[in-house]
Amino acid sequence: MTIVSVIFWCSLFLVFYSYIGYGILLFLVVRLKRLLYKPGIPDNISFTPEVTLMVAAYNEEAFIREKIANTLSLDYPADKVQIIFVTDGSSDNTNNIIKEYPRITLLYEAERRGKTMAVNRAMKYVKSPFVVFCDANTLLNKDVLNRLLIHFRDPATGAVAGEKKILVPGDAAAEGAGEGMYWKYESLLKKWDAELYSVMGAAGELFAIRTELYEDIPADTILDDFMISFGINKKGYRVAYAPDAYAMETPSASLEDEYKRKVRISAGGFQSMSRLLGLLNIFRYPRITWQYVSHRVLRWTAAPLCLLLLIITNILLCVFNGATVYWYILIMQVVFYIMALAGYIQAVQQKKSRLLYIPFYFTFMNIAVYKGFARFLKKKQSAVWERSARQLTTG
């Protein structure tokens, strides 16, 4: 039982560290940095460079007018903004709608080869020193460009990650509420990551880069945003965080849609990690490795595996050891997964429970990691993106 006990306690530690412990330790390190270091760039410096806003869209006719109206209403000098919509493969009325707006450059090819290839192609039309990427199914706050670009006053900043906000309708299902809670926690970690050094991977809903730092990424890339932002890290630049620049979207329309999205992200995560092995070398990337491993690698590798090992070894220790502490932990695990199951049942019934959505969403995400890993191994996850059905806001 000695080996089983070691596996149990190591698994418990890694699960705790991956989801809670890293956040606590990161906060303490950031607090120490605040005591020792003061920012040197004043906030009152005006900075309004030329910028390109790039939107990749596919069959978005139901939402594209609202997206365009939001884009054209952004508070930034119009003569300094180039707007590009790239819609490769769209077969509905999306292209005809975009053509109604002369300020927008429409890039379209009939063949659908995926978002990565579309962005690679569109970047050749960019004339500005900075590019802002955002999704077609999101709305941006009016001051978003100012809030993102101001961070580029620092020459060490190569990219800026915006904030993703989940607009949870009042009748949102459990997975929607869970998605919103998850992103609130992720936003807090991003804030501390950036304050220490760099955000660990920008979200494709909204981020900006220096145009000169962009390099074409392989056509089969699943998570283009992840690879673009870490590619900039590898060049020696940091990814800043702008919580006051945000993209708003509603949760996935159904449990099935959200699961499909999580599986795709997980498969893409394993693909990205396999292509970013150099970031594990702390001697080569001393400012990145700890944050990268703690915030990203463990979440997609050790933590899901340790959750499974934790329940198996806990049962064995209760049967063959019988110590009270093992029984207490097993009871807590059983209660947690019962709550997760109850949350799942409610989600299937399109019901919402604030008590159950955290254990449900946590378990839901980790199950998706296993499916994503299987797809990565079998190379069955396509890089071609699909529209995700989203819930409608009420009111």
Image: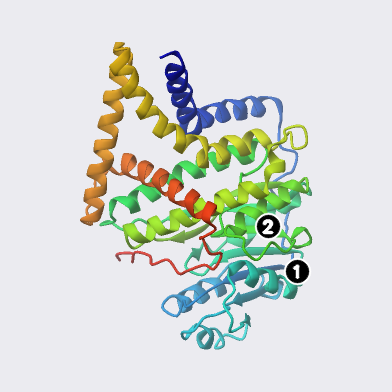
For the N terminus, the image quarter is: top left
Give neighbour class at mark 2: few <14, some 14-19, many 20+ (Cα, 10 Å).
many
In the image shown, does 167 or 299 lie closer to the viewer?
299
Residue ID for mark 1? 128
Give neighbour class at mark 1: few <14, some 14-19, many 20+ (Cα, 10 Å).
some
In the image shown, does 48 or 289 lie closer to the viewer?
289
Secondary structure at numbered mark 1? loop
Image position of 49 with respect to 33: above or below: below
Q: From this viewpoint, is residue 352 visible?
A: no
Query: Residue sitting at 43 percent across and 25 percent down?
Result: 12
- Callout 1 amino acid: Ser
Q: From this viewpoint, is residue 204 visible?
A: yes
Give coordinates of residue 178: x percent, y percent: 35, 47
Image position of 198 with respect to 34: above or below: below
Image position of 328 with respect to 58: above or below: above
Residue ID for mark 2? 149
Q: Which mark is residue 276?
A: none
For the C terminus, the image quarter is: bottom left
